[in-house]
Amino acid sequence: MGPMRKLSRRTFVRAAIGATAANAFMLSISVPANTTATVFVPAPSAGHVTESGIAAASRTAVRFLRCEDGQAVYEVQSSTWLFQASL
């Protein structure tokens, strides 16, 4: 996967950023058990964001928080997530 960010002595979040063939932003993130993460996805609105090919807003473990500076902001529970956004 990609670079890790150390949150404590035992907790790591893994993330990888890329682009699809259709020139869409792609973010893969793994959130460890018993934690949540705030995810910023560059998108003009939440309607432009999918998670594993399904509208992010329809996922029960993905909570839309707000749009901020051209990014849709979500809170996610522990799991592995694949966000995509059309740019």
Image: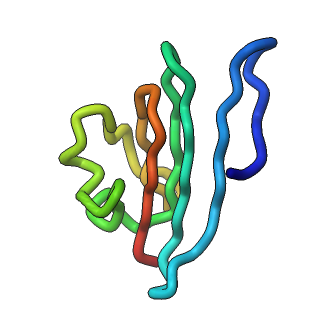
Image vertical order of residue 20 relative to residue 51, above or below: below
Q: Residue furthest left?
A: 58
Residue 8 relative to residue 59: left or right: right
Residue at 66 percent of width and 40 percent of height: 14
Residue at 42 percent of width and 68 percent of height: 85
Q: Residue furthest front?
A: 1
- Expressed as whole percent of the image width and height from the top left, the position of residue 61 reads 30, 32
Q: Residue furthest bottom?
A: 22
The front one of 52 and 70 is 52
- Expressed as whole percent of the image width and height from the top left, the position of residue 21 reads 50, 86
The front one of 12 and 73 is 12
Residue at 53 percent of width and 49 percent of height: 40
Q: How many marks do you count on the picture?
A: 0
Image vertical order of residue 81 relative to residue 7, above or below: below
- Expressed as whole percent of the image width and height from the top left, the position of residue 44 reads 40, 68
The front one of 3 and 42 is 3
The front one of 65 and 3 is 3
- Expressed as whole percent of the image width and height from the top left, the position of residue 42 reads 52, 62
Residue 66 relative to residue 17: left or right: left
Residue at 42 percent of width and 41 percent of height: 74
Residue 9 relative to residue 46: left or right: right
Image vertical order of residue 34 relative to residue 87, above or below: above
Image vertical order of residue 36 relative to residue 34, above or below: below
User: What coloring was used for the rendering?
Assistant: rainbow
